[in-house]
Amino acid sequence: MDSGQARGSETVCRMEPTAAQRAARDRIAAELAAAGFALPGTLTVRAYACGKPGCRCHADPPRLHGPYAEWTRKIGGKTVTRRLTPRELAEYQPLFDNAKKLRALLTELQDLTLDIIETGSSQEP
Ligand SMILES: [Zn+2]
């Protein structure tokens, strides 16, 4: 049925970044290149109330369980949450921090690119 490779739309790139925008891209690229290992998903640290009616977590004032560190991510389309031990938390924290930094850099690069294409289309002669 499928006749080989569809080429799709071939967009011609007509971006014309300024020197400052190129410099910004180079800085972001350098920071991306220097990034360390990174874990997927999110890390949350929180305290819980459990399901037991008479438990201390339902007292007044409540004394919640935890706080526990939980790592949530998608595995094969399913959301999986895993509780981390204090040792794992200490070990993995920098890897979550790296991931956060990478996401911030990517957002920065995308915003920069948006600026470039928007400037380019509005300043068409
Ligand atoms: Zn409880």
Image (cartoon, rainbow, N blue to C red):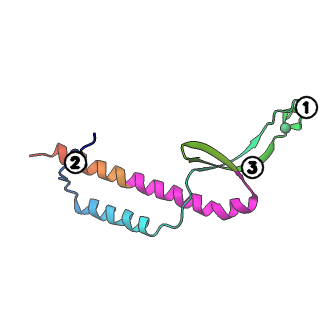
Of mark 3 and mark 2, the one earlier in the sequence is 2
- State left or right for residue 39 relative to residue 9: right
Front position among marks 2 and 1: 2
Q: Is residue 94 left or right of residue 110?
A: right
Crowd tier of the residue under label 1, counting other residues whose Cα lies within 10 Å: few below 14, some 14–19, many 20 or above: few
Q: Does residue 54 appear to the left or right of 66 in the view shown? A: right
- Where residue 28 sits, quadrant-wise, is bottom left
Instruction: Determine the residue located farthest toward the front in the rendered image.
Output: 1
For mark 2, give the secondary structure.
loop
Q: Is residue 81 above or below residue 52?
A: below
The residue carrying mark 1 has its beta carbon less than 8 Å from ligand 1: no
Badge 3 is on which residue?
68
Q: Are marks 2 and 1 in contact (CB under 8 Å)?
A: no
Q: Was residue 104 drawn as part of the magenta stretch in this picture?
A: yes
Magenta stretch prevailing secondary structure: helix
Establish if 67 lies above or below 36. Answer: above
User: Where does residue 53 sit, x and y in percent of width and height?
Assistant: 87, 29
Q: What stretch of residues is rendered in magenta? A: 83-108
In percent of width and height, residue 5 lies at 25, 49
**Amino acid type, mark 2:** Arg
> In which quadrant of the rendered view does residue 20 lie?
bottom left
